[in-house]
Image (cartoon, rainbow, N blue to C red):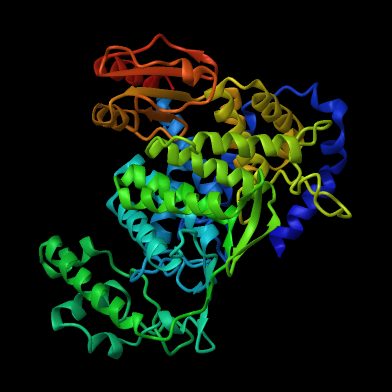
Amino acid sequence: ADIRQQNQALLEILHGELAAPSAAGKIELTVAPLQAARDQAVSHFDPTHGGFGGAPKFPHPTSLERLLRHWTASLQRGEPDHQAETAALFTLRKMALGGIYDHLGGGFYRYSVDAEWQIPHFEKMLYDNGPLLALYAQAWRATQDPLFHTVAEETGVWLIREMQSPEGGYYATLDADSEGEEGKFYLWTPEQVREQLTTEEYAVFAVCYGLELPANFEGHAWHLRVAAEPAELARRLNVEPAQVNAWLTAAQRKLFSVRSKRIWPGRDEKILTAWNGLAIRGMAIAGRHLGQPDFVASAERALDFIHNQLWRAGRLQAVYKDGQSRLNAYLDDYAFLIDGILELLQCRWRDGDLDFALALADVLLDRFEDRRNGGFYFTADDHETLIQRPKPPHDDALPSGNGIAVQTLLKLGHLTGRTRYLDAAERTLRWAWPAIEQMPNACNALLNALEERQEPAQTIVLRGEPAALREWCERCARPYAPRRLTLAIPPGAALPEGPLAEQHPGPATVTAWICQGLECQPPITTLETLENHLTGTETAG
């Protein structure tokens, strides 16, 4: 509620500036707010427990992703920002080790009621887990920290196992309570754990997950969080780390099996288009970075479900439940779904997906854009009349629809050469500039878009035989390059009119086109030349 009040206050403060068309054209966009947002985030960082501020503590994936991108950019400039690095990576580690993460089943709970990430509100939301899955996969790609790999892998597996409907869409939430009690499904006593495990397994598991410490849930139960990391346990016990991990893995499997026989929390089986867009993006990013084809296939099933069930006569629907799709979709539904499609296209090319993304983008421009002042309304122009037609610039629990819309329009504009997408993105940034300047740390999605506008990222199009494309794709993914868009397109692909269709594969096994914005390099036909080009741009930033 506090966040919503703060956001409403922000809107009211800025209403005059955001509504004034005359000022927008005179604004000079700069990258200054990127540093200002970094400074604000670092100033709120909790150096003891990670995260920002005190209890209750929320994950804030948009802030963490912004810091991760900021740190990566600083590395490429040869001026590593260690404070941004610590704020992002220390927080991700503390969350992964804390009670906000489900150590038996994967996935994150909604928030921590304390500042130490120990005890969560036990609801699991799709809209948290999609962005957090993406974030941990990106953090693993950036650092190779095995903890991040484990968390991303387990969260993706959880999403498929417990949140994906048989038809393909992802469900909305898992409730916090079962049998009328908050967290009951997830809590243990040492006795319950001991009777399921061998002596060695229990000895290690109890120390690792805090069962030897006093009860941490209302004085009578234990909620699992990592009290001692496996490497530390191995040193303490003078045992090989592999043996400790084997005992812990065996214990986790047994306890997961026992827990699965309990009465489950309720599940909200609505399929929400916007939240599915976030989950498709997360699964695609994790599938690509972790080399998990099952995740990519899961994202594809979800996209196909939305395309088949929630795309009606050229318009999206927002909700699917009990065999019925309903409610005209909102800004977030369109923007997040386009974003998910663009990430999925980087995992594998499939004819029709880019066309769907372009059709969605056209509806955004035709039905949601404020052509006079810039920016996108939350509702379409034929939505029932509201007292105020909101046009939010800030991130809330979800990233800003305006911010994601601009990011995707810039990518689509650069890919296809369709300048109307680029023009709409520009108008939105100019409209949002007062909000970005005044509260940059509340506008991380727009900041990512601003960065794309000011310093266009690389778009790499690879054309060639699928087997040969794989090696080139893998090179384009190293090291972590969060802003690079790479498409590997096989021969005979159906492409929309424009630059993509004109990039014909030549006699070489693979041909690469590297573009920045609308400026493209001559075609590259050897992996060595690609390597040299990427190495040069990585060090130059």
Q: Nearer the viewer, residue 367 or 76?
A: 367
Q: Nearer the viewer, residue 385 or 99?
A: 385
Asked whether, in this view, residue 404 is left or right of residue 157, the answer is: right
Question: Image height check: is 208 above or below 363?
Answer: below
Quadrant in which the N terminus is drawn? bottom right
Q: How many marks?
A: 0
Answer yes or no: is residue 446 visible. no
Q: Nearer the viewer, residue 414 or 402?
A: 414
In percent of width and height, residue 419 lies at: 65, 21
Instruction: Choose top left, top right, bottom left or bottom right for residue 369.
Output: top right
Q: Residue at x 48, y 47 (%)?
A: 281
Instruction: Choose top left, top right, bottom left or bottom right for residue 33.
Output: top right
Quadrant in which the C terminus is drawn? top left
In percent of width and height, residue 440 lies at: 66, 40
Q: Residue at x 84, y 27 (%)?
A: 23
Residue placed furthest toward the top: 522
Asked whether, in this view, residue 529 is left or right of residue 112, the answer is: left
Instruction: Choose top left, top right, bottom left or bottom right for residue 362.
Output: top right
Question: Image height check: is 436 above or below 178?
Answer: above
Q: Nearer the viewer, residue 33 or 350?
A: 350
Question: Image height check: is 536 above or below 308?
Answer: above
Question: Image height check: is 374 above or below 85?
Answer: above
In percent of width and height, residue 427 lies at: 74, 28
Q: Residue at x 28, y 12 (%)?
A: 507
Q: Residue at x 65, y 56 (%)?
A: 318
Answer yes or no: is residue 29 visible. yes
Asked whether, in this view, residue 394 is left or right of residue 146, the answer is: right
In percent of width and height, residue 202 lies at: 20, 80
